[in-house]
Image (cartoon, grey):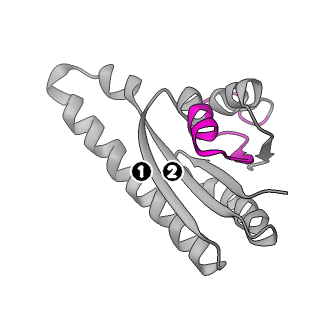
């Protein structure tokens, strides 16, 4: 049913639960697991000019760690893994990636590190992906 499963990460602690679901689905369907980290350009562009490079570098380093976790988790489960770091606005970049790469399922957590009412509401990125994704989205509840 699924040939390509995308797990989108922001590097937050809930990624572990989300990755477990995505990996299981990929393994059960002999699918390729795609890991995607989006460097949110709004975050470093909002910083003052003197700090923009430092903020961007920090986001990229965080992305490297998050994507390494996905690569290791997928490989330990015996699934083919593709990781990618892109720059942009997270929800748009995730849905564009899904469309461009022929993704069959997007797996995300209920929230990342943003959002005041995490328990009651989906995170804003997840909510926007659910509303605009060209494919089904599995939302994993994160405590």
Q: Is residue 117 magenta?
A: yes
Farthest right residue in view: 1
User: What residue do we see at 63% from left, 36% from top?
Assistant: 99
Q: Which mark is residue 105?
A: none
For the residue pair 81 and 46, the one nearer the viewer reads as 81
Q: Which residue was labeled with disc 1?
A: 63
Pick the quarter of the image with the N terminus: bottom right
Location of residue 2 in the rendering, given as x and y in whole percent from the top left corner: 79, 56
Label 2 SS = loop
> Of discs 2 and 1, which sits in the foreground?
1
* 60 versus 25 height, above or below: above
Q: Is residue 138 left or right of residue 9?
A: right
In the image, which residues are magenta?
95-119
* 132 versus 53 height, above or below: above
Considering only order in the chain, which callout, 1 or 2, is on the residue closer to the N terminus? 2
User: What residue do we see at 73% from left, 65% from top?
Assistant: 26
Q: Which residue was labeled with disc 2?
A: 11
User: What residue do we see at 53% from left, 32% from top?
Assistant: 93
Location of residue 19 in the rendering, given as x and y in whole percent from the top left corner: 66, 60
Residue 42: image quadrant is: top left
Tell me if mark 1 has few (under 14), some (14-19) or many (20+) residues whose alpha carbon lies within 10 angstroms of its own. many
Label 1 SS = helix
Q: Is residue 86 left or right of residue 49?
A: right
Residue 77 seen from this side: yes
Location of residue 71 in the rendering, given as x and y in whole percent from the top left corner: 52, 67
C-alpha distance separating marks 2 and 1:
7 Å
Residue 53: image quadrant is: top left
* 35 versus 73 height, above or below: above
Residue 16 seen from this side: no
């Amino acid at each position: 049913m699924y040939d390509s499963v995308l797990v989108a990460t922001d590097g937050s602690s809930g990624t572990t639960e989300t990755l477990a679901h995505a990996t299981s689905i990929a393994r059960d369907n002999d699918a390729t697991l795609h890991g995607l980290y989006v460097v949110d350009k709004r975050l470093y562009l909002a910083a003052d000019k003197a700090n923009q490079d430092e903020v961007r570098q920090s986001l990229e380093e965080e992305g490297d760690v998050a994507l390494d976790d996905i690569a290791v988790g997928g490989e330990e489960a015996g699934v083919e893994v593709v990781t990618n770091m892109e720059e942009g606005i997270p929800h748009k970049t995730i849905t564009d990636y899904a469309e461009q790469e022929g993704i069959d399922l997007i797996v995300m957590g209920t929230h990342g590190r943003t959002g005041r009412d995490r328990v009651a509401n989906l995170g804003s990125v997840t909510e926007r992906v659910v509303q605009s994704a060209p494919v089904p989205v599995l939302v994993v509840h994160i405590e």
